């Protein structure tokens, strides 16, 4: 008898925040069922979805009786419950730089990505208002330069010598920079080398550098 996967991941597989969790699930070797919800698929306003996440956002992870929302919360939960201290150390001081970069992406990259990508590349309202896509591109460039400097000074991964959860959200944001950047933006060699290292990981190739921006 085939035992179905215990994990359900709700959210369209081309969504920025869903792709991060899919990459991590591959890193963990987890079996899961992914269900398409959101733009172009089943509406997240459906009562079935809102019963799991009243905010109506993706992704949502269902792990038995546990129901979680917010991609970085889900990623921390998965690393902790699967005992992956290599991805998210338990010791507070070792854990801090990993979580600091995760929070940096959540707080510092959200508006530049919305303006630069949703407005500038996809042309979606309200992010495509006058001057907004160009503002997003400039702010995106500033933040990619921050990553490049950090990788130049440290590395080879964002939080130090080893791959951690820090590399997943930042890697997704840096991957998307390729379609937002303009011809005037300088090359960022450390950032490019880091993306090449991430490309050695099957989960990155399957869910991030898979032909989608």
Image (cartoon, rainbow, N blue to C red):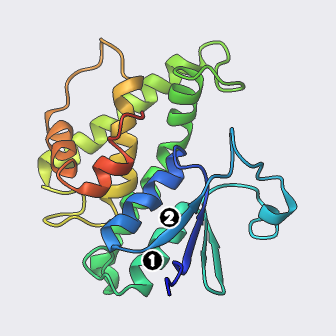
Is 52 displayed left or right of 24 in the figure? right
In the picture of the structure, the residue carrying the numbered disc 1 is 78
What residue sits right under mark 2 in the picture? 72
Residue 9 picture location, percent across and down: 57, 65
Is 109 left, or right, of 208 in this rendering?
A: right
Report the side of 160 relative to 49 (left or right).
Answer: left
Q: Residues within 10 Å of mark 1 (few under 14, many from 20)?
A: many
Q: Residue at x 34, y 40 (%)?
A: 174
Camera-side residue of 205 and 16: 205
Residue placed at 76% from the left, 56% from the top?
56
Q: Residues within 10 Å of mark 2 (few under 14, many from 20)?
A: many
Residue furthest right in the image: 47
Residue at image position (52%, 70%) is 74
Q: Nearer the viewer, mark 2 or mark 1?
A: 1
Q: Does residue 143 appear in this view?
A: no
Question: Do callouts 2 and 1 mark residues in contact (Cβ within 8 Å)?
Answer: no
Q: CA distance from mark 2 to mark 1?
A: 10 Å
Assign a secondary structure to mark 2.
helix
């Amino acid at each position: 008898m085939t035992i179905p996967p215990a994990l359900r991941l709700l959210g369209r597989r081309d969504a920025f925040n869903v792709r991060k969790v899919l990459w991590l699930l591959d890193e963990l070797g987890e079996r899961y069922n992914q269900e398409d919800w959101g733009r172009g698929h089943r509406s997240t306003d459906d009562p079935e979805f809102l019963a799991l996440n009243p905010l109506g956002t993706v992704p949502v992870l269902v792990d038995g009786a546990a129901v979680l929302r917010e991609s970085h919360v889900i990623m921390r939960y998965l690393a902790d419950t699967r005992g992956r201290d290599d991805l998210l150390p338990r010791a507070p001081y070792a854990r801090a730089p990993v979580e600091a970069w995760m929070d940096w992406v959540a707080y510092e990259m959200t508006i530049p990505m919305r303006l630069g990508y949703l407005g500038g590349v996809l042309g979606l309202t309200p992010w495509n208002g006058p001057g907004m896509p160009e503002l997003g591109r400039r702010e995106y460039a500033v933040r990619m330069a921050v990553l490049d400097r950090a990788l130049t000074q440290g590395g080879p991964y964002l939080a130090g010598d080893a791959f951690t959860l820090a590399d997943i959200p930042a890697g997704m944001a840096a991957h998307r920079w390729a379609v937002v950047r303009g011809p005037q933006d300088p090359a960022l060699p450390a950032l490019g080398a880091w993306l090449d290292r991430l490309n050695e990981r099957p989960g990155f190739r399957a869910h991030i550098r898979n032909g989608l921006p």
